[in-house]
Image (tube, rainbow, N blue to C red):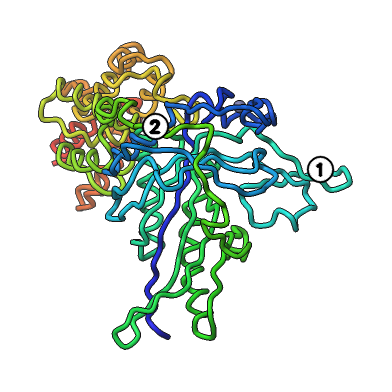
Amino acid sequence: MPNYIPTIGLEIHAELKTKTKMFCDSPNNPEENHPNVNVCPVCLGHPGTLPTINKEAVKSVIRVGVALGGEINPQTKFDRKNYFYPDLPKGYQISQYDQPLVLGGSLNGVTLTRIHLEEDTGRLLHSASSKAQSVNNSNEERFAISAKPLASYVDFNRAGVPLMELVTEPDIKSAEEAVNFARELQLILRYLDVSSADMEKGQMRVEVNISLGKWVKGVWKQGTKVEVKNLNSFGAVAGCVAYEIKRQAEVMKIGKLSQETRGWDDAKKETVSQRSKEEAHDYRYFPEPDLPPFETASLGLEKLKDSIPELPAAKRERFKKEYDLEGAKLESLIIDQRLAEFFEEAVSELKTFNPDANPQTLLNYLSSDLVGLMKENEVNFDDIKIKPEALAHLAFLIDQGKILSRGAKDILRKMFESGVDPEDILNAEGLHIVSDQSELEKVVVEIIAENPAAVADFKKGKTASVQFLIGKAMSKLKGKGDPGILRDLFERHLK
Ligand SMILES: [Zn+2]
């Protein structure tokens, strides 16, 4: 088996979350389920209509470019990319050809070629049994209808939605690197608040260009490039790369690969040939005559640069240092900007209770219990009643041993429902831990008297029976005894 080395480049499309579409003022609402309501003569491609540029979309792409260290092209323009497809009413897509908004940049050590702005297409929907026509194009959906004859439908709600396209150099060498790149980009788009980038909803779509190469007697031989389009999940990206590496190596052993575009069959976990690859000249690109070229300086580049928030990589480094976090715990905060913000506010409150406090308890209750409650009740950080200060107070009381961990979850639930401070819940419900020595001692003496067998076991050297006695005392105290003090008292009384 020759040692093929994969060469992988990505093209990632992301729908921008502007209020209106790219070249008209029809609403850009990906949640709209009723077909063909967010449309107008411009995005339906009626003759005689004129597009206008959505500046918010242009600004969004510039901010992505700045965040990724790209060069913002001083002069840019739109071009027509001509092709026919039923989801493209104009017969061309307005895109950018030779003067994209952003040139270069890098992410995760992968060099970016360019980032440009274009418009999305509509969506085709095929009746269930017209499978043959729609196979492998995940842009299209099938739905079950019993009516005959078979039919295809088109929904133009998505036609003209601003679409960012990012193209990388073929720097990627493995499925893992490809997925990591796409994940980090998704995170950055969310941090910049320019796209929801939800892959399952088609808001971020990945295309993989992959070829294999190898050294033959000191000469690098690059194999034919294959493109796999419309990957709608990270799992599909990983699966597609792994599958193509294997498939291409097998084909190259016996013959020649054809240059083609393939699709991903998620059920079979394999790629399938769709069509031979188009070349740029097939599209007859030419400058969009209805939109003049423009200078990006007119959009206020300095202000856009200042609007870039702390990005995931920087936040990761800072959280590592400031909070001594790493691995999955750190990542659970980084993937959710609002969660990270809530955490930082709560930690700073926690320091007011105890300047040396370790944020570990706080993080546990935040990232597992509170986030769990939020999911269960479908609320987000905008609507949550519990304040960072109250969560910090809870963590402080737990660390102080004033609340036992088994009671803490109930208290957190009550805080979540009402927004009150944990101390108020303790007072109202008499949940304070009993740590009064004489009160606990009384119970210890009683339990020792009531359980002679366990006491005898202990005296025979079975030290574990002290745990049994603590359990008995706890149930007498309705779970509110301080376990540390109880243990000390038992050990003292049994000796
Ligand atoms: Zn429109």
What x and y, as percent, mark residue 60?
39, 32
Q: Position of residue 108 (x, y in %)?
A: 29, 52
Q: Amino acid at mark 2?
A: Phe
Q: Specify whether 88 is left or right of 415.
A: right
Depth check: give the residue in front, 79 or 344: 79
When the figure is inspected, residue 424 is found, relative to residue 464, above or below; the finding is above
Observer-nearest of 490 and 144: 144
Q: Is residue 198 visible?
A: no
Q: Amino acid at mark 1?
A: Ile
Image quarter hosting the N terminus: bottom left
Tell me the number on the disc at residue 294: 2
The image quadrant that residue 42 belongs to is top right
Q: How far is disc 2 from disc 1 in space, using C-alphas?
A: 48 Å
Q: Quadrant of the C terminus?
A: top left
| Callout 2 crowding tier (Cα within 10 Å): few <14, some 14–19, many ≥20 | few
As drawn, 382 above or below 469: above
From the viewer's perspective, tell me whether residue 318 is left or right of residue 478: left
